[in-house]
Image (tube, grey):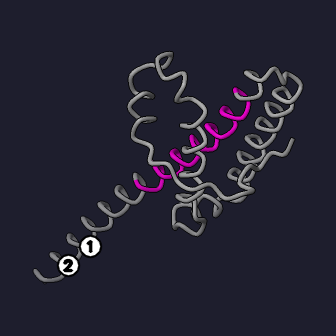
Amino acid sequence: MKTTIIAIVTAIIFSFAGYILGGYYGVSRMARDSNYANLMWLTAIDKDLEQGNIDRAKKLTFQATDATFGALQTIDTIPQSGLMTVLGVFNMKAYNDQVSTRAKQHFITRLDELSEPPKIQIQQIVKVEMPQRSCPVKK
C-alpha cells in the first residue's frame, strides 16, 4: 500500500513538473519564433522605407498583416500546428538565424537609435551564411 501511494505521488509530481516545464518550453519557443517572423517583416519594411519604396513598404505591411491573420486562424482552428512547432518538426532555428542575420546587417548602422536591450541582442547575433534565395518576399 505504501509503495502504491509513493508511486502515485511520484507520478503526480513528475506529471505536474513535466506539464509546467513543457508548457514553458513550448510557449517560449513559439513566442521566439513569432517575434523572429515579426522581425523579418519589420526589417524588410524599414529597408524599403529607407530606400523610398513607399508602395513596396505598404505592400509588405499588408502581406505581413495577412500572414499574421492567417497564422492566427490556423492556430485557432488547427491546434496541432503549435504542437508541431513545439516538437521541433520545423527547422525554425536555421530560419531564425537567417532572419536575425538580415536584421543585424540592416539595423547595425542605426544601433545608437535603439534602446539598450535591442543593442545587446543585435550585438550578440552571430551572423550565418545566407542562402542565395532566402528572402520570402520578391520585388
Image height check: is 46 above or below 68?
above
Report how many numbered discs are placed on residues in the image: 2
- 23 or 104: nearer the eye? 104
Q: Quadrant of residue 84?
A: bottom right
Q: Quadrant of the C terminus?
A: top right
The local crowd at label 2, few if under 14, some if 14 to 19, many if 20 or more residues have their Cα within 10 Å, is few
- 66 or 102: nearer the eye? 102
Image height check: is 36 above or below 75?
above
Verify whether residue 30 appears in magenta: yes
What residue type is disc 2 on? Ala
- 97 or 3: nearer the eye? 97
Q: Residue at x 65, y 40 (%)?
A: 40
Residue 4 horizontal side relative to residue 103, left or right: left
Residue 48 horizontal side relative to residue 89, left or right: right
Residue found farthest to the left: 2
Verify whether residue 40 appears in magenta: yes
Q: Which mark is residue 115?
A: none
Find the magenta span and give its range.
25-46
Q: Residue at x 52, y 29 (%)?
A: 108
Q: Quadrant of the N terminus?
A: bottom left
Q: Quadrant of residue 132?
A: bottom right
Q: Residue at x 81, y 34 (%)?
A: 60
What residue type is disc 1 on? Ala
The local crowd at label 1, few if under 14, some if 14 to 19, many if 20 or more residues have their Cα within 10 Å, is few
Q: Which mark is residue 11?
A: 1
In percent of width and height, residue 46 lies at 70, 26
